[in-house]
Image: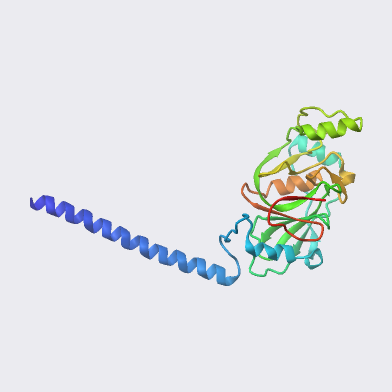
Amino acid sequence: MLLFLLNHGLILLVISFTIFLKEEIMKYIIVAVLALQLSGCSVMPELDSYGTTSDVRVAQNISTNELLPGTKLLPPYVTENPRDRQALASDPYVSEAHNVTFPDVSCGVQQGDIVIYTGARKLLFVTACGEGKLYPIAVGREGMQWAGSTTVERATPWPDWRPPEEMRIREAVKGHDLPVMMPGGLDNPLGARAIYLAGTPYRIHGTNKPESIGTDASSGCIRMHNADVMDLYSKVRVGARVYVLDKNGMLPNKIAVQN
Protein backbone atom coordinates (compact mmCIF):
# COMPACT_ATOMS: atom_id res chain seq x y z
CA MET A 1 0.00 0.00 0.00
CA LEU A 2 2.83 2.35 0.90
CA LEU A 3 4.59 1.51 -2.37
CA PHE A 4 1.36 2.20 -4.27
CA LEU A 5 1.00 5.64 -2.66
CA LEU A 6 4.65 6.47 -3.30
CA ASN A 7 4.37 5.50 -6.98
CA HIS A 8 1.21 7.54 -7.49
CA GLY A 9 2.65 10.45 -5.58
CA LEU A 10 5.72 10.41 -7.83
CA ILE A 11 3.53 10.35 -10.96
CA LEU A 12 1.49 13.33 -9.70
CA LEU A 13 4.72 15.19 -8.94
CA VAL A 14 6.04 14.53 -12.48
CA ILE A 15 2.75 15.68 -14.04
CA SER A 16 2.69 18.85 -11.94
CA PHE A 17 6.32 19.64 -12.80
CA THR A 18 5.62 19.06 -16.54
CA ILE A 19 2.66 21.45 -16.45
CA PHE A 20 4.82 24.01 -14.65
CA LEU A 21 7.55 23.68 -17.31
CA LYS A 22 5.05 24.07 -20.15
CA GLU A 23 3.66 27.22 -18.57
CA GLU A 24 7.14 28.67 -18.12
CA ILE A 25 8.14 27.77 -21.70
CA MET A 26 4.96 29.38 -23.05
CA LYS A 27 5.78 32.54 -21.12
CA TYR A 28 9.18 32.72 -22.82
CA ILE A 29 7.63 32.02 -26.26
CA ILE A 30 5.03 34.77 -25.76
CA VAL A 31 7.72 37.23 -24.64
CA ALA A 32 9.89 36.32 -27.66
CA VAL A 33 7.01 36.76 -30.11
CA LEU A 34 6.08 40.13 -28.60
CA ALA A 35 9.71 41.25 -28.80
CA LEU A 36 9.93 40.28 -32.48
CA GLN A 37 6.70 42.08 -33.30
CA LEU A 38 7.84 45.22 -31.50
CA SER A 39 11.13 45.09 -33.41
CA GLY A 40 9.19 45.35 -36.69
CA CYS A 41 9.27 41.77 -37.99
CA SER A 42 6.03 39.86 -37.51
CA VAL A 43 6.42 36.11 -36.99
CA MET A 44 3.01 34.88 -38.20
CA PRO A 45 0.71 37.51 -39.69
CA GLU A 46 -2.98 37.46 -38.85
CA LEU A 47 -5.08 36.40 -41.84
CA ASP A 48 -8.24 38.16 -42.83
CA SER A 49 -11.31 36.42 -44.30
CA TYR A 50 -9.78 36.27 -47.77
CA GLY A 51 -6.55 34.66 -46.62
CA THR A 52 -4.45 37.76 -47.24
CA THR A 53 -2.64 39.61 -44.47
CA SER A 54 -3.84 43.00 -43.39
CA ASP A 55 -0.24 44.13 -43.28
CA VAL A 56 0.26 43.23 -46.93
CA ARG A 57 -1.10 46.68 -47.70
CA VAL A 58 2.54 47.55 -47.02
CA ALA A 59 3.48 45.63 -50.17
CA GLN A 60 0.67 47.35 -52.04
CA ASN A 61 1.95 50.75 -50.97
CA ILE A 62 5.54 50.08 -52.07
CA SER A 63 5.74 51.67 -55.48
CA THR A 64 8.59 50.54 -57.70
CA ASN A 65 9.97 54.08 -57.32
CA GLU A 66 10.64 53.22 -53.68
CA LEU A 67 12.67 50.11 -54.52
CA LEU A 68 16.15 51.50 -54.16
CA PRO A 69 18.82 49.67 -56.18
CA GLY A 70 21.77 48.16 -54.36
CA THR A 71 25.33 48.96 -55.26
CA LYS A 72 25.71 46.21 -57.83
CA LEU A 73 23.82 43.73 -59.96
CA LEU A 74 23.43 40.19 -58.71
CA PRO A 75 26.00 37.69 -59.99
CA PRO A 76 24.68 35.58 -62.89
CA TYR A 77 23.16 32.21 -62.03
CA VAL A 78 25.86 29.53 -62.09
CA THR A 79 25.16 25.87 -62.73
CA GLU A 80 27.06 22.74 -63.62
CA ASN A 81 23.97 20.93 -64.93
CA PRO A 82 24.50 20.39 -68.70
CA ARG A 83 20.84 20.96 -69.54
CA ASP A 84 20.73 24.16 -67.51
CA ARG A 85 23.95 25.40 -69.09
CA GLN A 86 22.47 24.76 -72.54
CA ALA A 87 19.42 26.83 -71.61
CA LEU A 88 21.58 29.70 -70.37
CA ALA A 89 23.70 29.59 -73.53
CA SER A 90 20.57 29.84 -75.69
CA ASP A 91 19.61 33.18 -74.07
CA PRO A 92 22.24 35.94 -74.34
CA TYR A 93 20.46 37.84 -71.54
CA VAL A 94 22.71 39.66 -69.08
CA SER A 95 20.90 39.66 -65.74
CA GLU A 96 19.15 42.90 -64.84
CA ALA A 97 18.14 41.51 -61.44
CA HIS A 98 19.48 43.51 -58.53
CA ASN A 99 19.27 43.88 -54.78
CA VAL A 100 16.82 46.51 -53.56
CA THR A 101 15.66 48.05 -50.30
CA PHE A 102 12.18 49.34 -49.50
CA PRO A 103 10.32 50.93 -46.56
CA ASP A 104 9.85 48.15 -44.01
CA VAL A 105 6.74 49.55 -42.28
CA SER A 106 6.05 46.70 -39.80
CA CYS A 107 7.41 44.16 -42.30
CA GLY A 108 4.01 43.30 -43.72
CA VAL A 109 5.75 41.08 -46.26
CA GLN A 110 7.79 38.20 -44.87
CA GLN A 111 11.15 36.74 -45.82
CA GLY A 112 10.55 34.40 -48.76
CA ASP A 113 7.40 36.19 -49.97
CA ILE A 114 7.01 37.23 -53.60
CA VAL A 115 5.42 40.50 -54.73
CA ILE A 116 4.58 40.89 -58.43
CA TYR A 117 4.13 44.39 -59.87
CA THR A 118 2.00 43.85 -62.97
CA GLY A 119 2.16 47.49 -64.13
CA ALA A 120 5.95 47.73 -63.77
CA ARG A 121 6.55 44.14 -64.96
CA LYS A 122 8.79 43.39 -62.00
CA LEU A 123 8.97 40.56 -59.44
CA LEU A 124 10.26 41.22 -55.92
CA PHE A 125 11.58 38.31 -53.85
CA VAL A 126 11.75 39.41 -50.20
CA THR A 127 15.04 38.40 -48.56
CA ALA A 128 14.60 40.26 -45.23
CA CYS A 129 12.60 43.09 -43.68
CA GLY A 130 12.99 45.96 -46.12
CA GLU A 131 15.28 44.04 -48.50
CA GLY A 132 14.74 41.99 -51.63
CA LYS A 133 15.81 41.02 -55.12
CA LEU A 134 14.04 42.52 -58.11
CA TYR A 135 13.68 40.65 -61.41
CA PRO A 136 12.24 41.74 -64.79
CA ILE A 137 9.22 39.70 -65.93
CA ALA A 138 6.55 39.41 -68.61
CA VAL A 139 2.91 39.50 -67.52
CA GLY A 140 -0.45 38.63 -69.08
CA ARG A 141 -1.78 40.29 -72.18
CA GLU A 142 -4.62 42.79 -71.88
CA GLY A 143 -7.68 40.93 -70.62
CA MET A 144 -5.56 38.07 -69.26
CA GLN A 145 -3.90 39.85 -66.36
CA TRP A 146 -4.97 38.93 -62.85
CA ALA A 147 -4.30 40.01 -59.29
CA GLY A 148 -4.71 38.62 -55.79
CA SER A 149 -2.97 36.62 -53.08
CA THR A 150 -1.95 32.98 -53.27
CA THR A 151 0.88 30.66 -52.20
CA VAL A 152 3.59 28.57 -53.83
CA GLU A 153 2.13 25.09 -54.26
CA ARG A 154 5.16 23.36 -55.76
CA ALA A 155 8.17 24.01 -57.96
CA THR A 156 9.55 21.84 -60.76
CA PRO A 157 12.72 21.83 -62.89
CA TRP A 158 12.20 21.39 -66.62
CA PRO A 159 8.41 21.03 -66.35
CA ASP A 160 6.13 19.40 -68.88
CA TRP A 161 3.62 21.77 -70.47
CA ARG A 162 -0.05 20.85 -70.58
CA PRO A 163 -1.91 23.78 -72.11
CA PRO A 164 -5.52 23.96 -70.83
CA GLU A 165 -8.27 23.07 -73.27
CA GLU A 166 -9.56 26.65 -73.52
CA MET A 167 -6.07 27.77 -74.59
CA ARG A 168 -5.85 25.07 -77.24
CA ILE A 169 -9.28 26.05 -78.59
CA ARG A 170 -8.37 29.75 -78.57
CA GLU A 171 -5.08 29.17 -80.37
CA ALA A 172 -6.68 26.77 -82.88
CA VAL A 173 -8.91 29.64 -84.04
CA LYS A 174 -5.71 31.54 -84.81
CA GLY A 175 -4.35 28.59 -86.74
CA HIS A 176 -1.98 27.38 -83.99
CA ASP A 177 -2.29 23.72 -83.02
CA LEU A 178 -1.04 23.23 -79.46
CA PRO A 179 -0.11 19.78 -78.14
CA VAL A 180 -1.99 18.14 -75.29
CA MET A 181 1.39 17.70 -73.57
CA MET A 182 4.92 18.83 -74.36
CA PRO A 183 7.79 17.34 -72.33
CA GLY A 184 10.26 19.65 -70.62
CA GLY A 185 13.06 20.94 -72.84
CA LEU A 186 14.57 23.95 -74.58
CA ASP A 187 11.55 24.37 -76.89
CA ASN A 188 9.04 24.14 -74.03
CA PRO A 189 7.30 27.51 -73.35
CA LEU A 190 7.68 26.96 -69.57
CA GLY A 191 11.46 27.09 -69.82
CA ALA A 192 13.87 25.70 -67.26
CA ARG A 193 11.74 26.00 -64.08
CA ALA A 194 8.09 26.39 -63.08
CA ILE A 195 6.71 27.60 -59.75
CA TYR A 196 3.04 26.64 -59.44
CA LEU A 197 0.62 29.01 -57.70
CA ALA A 198 -2.02 27.37 -55.50
CA GLY A 199 -5.69 27.69 -56.46
CA THR A 200 -4.89 29.13 -59.88
CA PRO A 201 -3.98 27.84 -63.36
CA TYR A 202 -0.95 30.16 -63.29
CA ARG A 203 2.79 29.67 -62.81
CA ILE A 204 5.94 31.70 -62.52
CA HIS A 205 8.17 30.09 -65.13
CA GLY A 206 11.02 30.44 -67.58
CA THR A 207 10.55 30.94 -71.29
CA ASN A 208 11.71 29.97 -74.76
CA LYS A 209 10.95 33.56 -75.87
CA PRO A 210 13.34 35.73 -73.85
CA GLU A 211 12.53 38.74 -76.02
CA SER A 212 9.06 38.82 -74.44
CA ILE A 213 10.38 39.74 -70.98
CA GLY A 214 9.37 43.27 -70.08
CA THR A 215 6.13 43.09 -72.07
CA ASP A 216 2.48 42.03 -71.69
CA ALA A 217 2.81 38.75 -73.53
CA SER A 218 1.44 35.71 -71.68
CA SER A 219 -1.96 34.12 -71.08
CA GLY A 220 -1.71 35.06 -67.39
CA CYS A 221 1.45 33.30 -66.24
CA ILE A 222 4.50 35.25 -65.08
CA ARG A 223 7.49 34.74 -67.37
CA MET A 224 11.12 35.16 -66.40
CA HIS A 225 14.44 34.74 -68.14
CA ASN A 226 15.67 31.18 -67.55
CA ALA A 227 18.68 32.48 -65.62
CA ASP A 228 16.39 34.42 -63.28
CA VAL A 229 13.81 31.68 -62.76
CA MET A 230 16.61 29.22 -61.96
CA ASP A 231 17.88 31.66 -59.35
CA LEU A 232 14.38 32.20 -57.90
CA TYR A 233 13.68 28.46 -57.90
CA SER A 234 16.79 27.88 -55.79
CA LYS A 235 15.45 30.27 -53.12
CA VAL A 236 11.67 29.89 -53.08
CA ARG A 237 9.89 27.62 -50.60
CA VAL A 238 6.58 25.78 -50.83
CA GLY A 239 3.91 27.68 -48.91
CA ALA A 240 5.48 31.11 -49.47
CA ARG A 241 3.00 33.93 -50.03
CA VAL A 242 2.70 35.42 -53.53
CA TYR A 243 1.05 38.84 -53.89
CA VAL A 244 0.12 39.87 -57.43
CA LEU A 245 -0.68 43.58 -57.63
CA ASP A 246 -2.79 44.84 -60.51
CA LYS A 247 -1.51 47.37 -63.05
CA ASN A 248 -2.60 50.19 -60.72
CA GLY A 249 -0.58 48.75 -57.83
CA MET A 250 -3.64 47.52 -55.93
CA LEU A 251 -4.21 44.11 -54.30
CA PRO A 252 -7.81 42.82 -54.55
CA ASN A 253 -9.33 40.92 -51.63
CA LYS A 254 -9.53 37.79 -53.74
CA ILE A 255 -7.98 36.52 -56.96
CA ALA A 256 -9.60 38.19 -59.95
CA VAL A 257 -8.89 38.54 -63.67
CA GLN A 258 -8.38 42.19 -64.63
CA ASN A 259 -10.26 43.43 -67.69
Of residues 74 and 203, the one drawn nearer to the viewer in this rendering: 203
The residue at 82%/57% (across/down) is 247
Q: Give coordinates of residue 156: x percent, y percent.
A: 69, 39
Q: Give coordinates of residue 27: x percent, y percent.
A: 41, 67
Q: Is residue 188 visible?
A: no
Whether 112 is drawn above or below 218: the answer is below
The residue at 90%/45% (across/down) is 211
Q: How many marks?
A: 0
Apparent side of residue 231 relative to residue 214 in the rendered image (left or right): left
Looking at the rendering, which quadrant does residue 54 occupy?
bottom right
Of residues 3 and 143, the one drawn nearer to the viewer in this rendering: 143
Q: Residue furthest bottom?
A: 38
Of residues 69 and 207, the one drawn nearer to the viewer in this rendering: 207
Q: Residue furthest left?
A: 1
Q: Residue furthest right?
A: 175
Of residues 219 and 19, the one drawn nearer to the viewer in this rendering: 219
Q: Give coordinates of residue 63: x percent, y percent.
A: 78, 65
The residue at 11%/51% (across/down) is 3
Q: Give coordinates of residue 190: x percent, y percent.
A: 78, 38
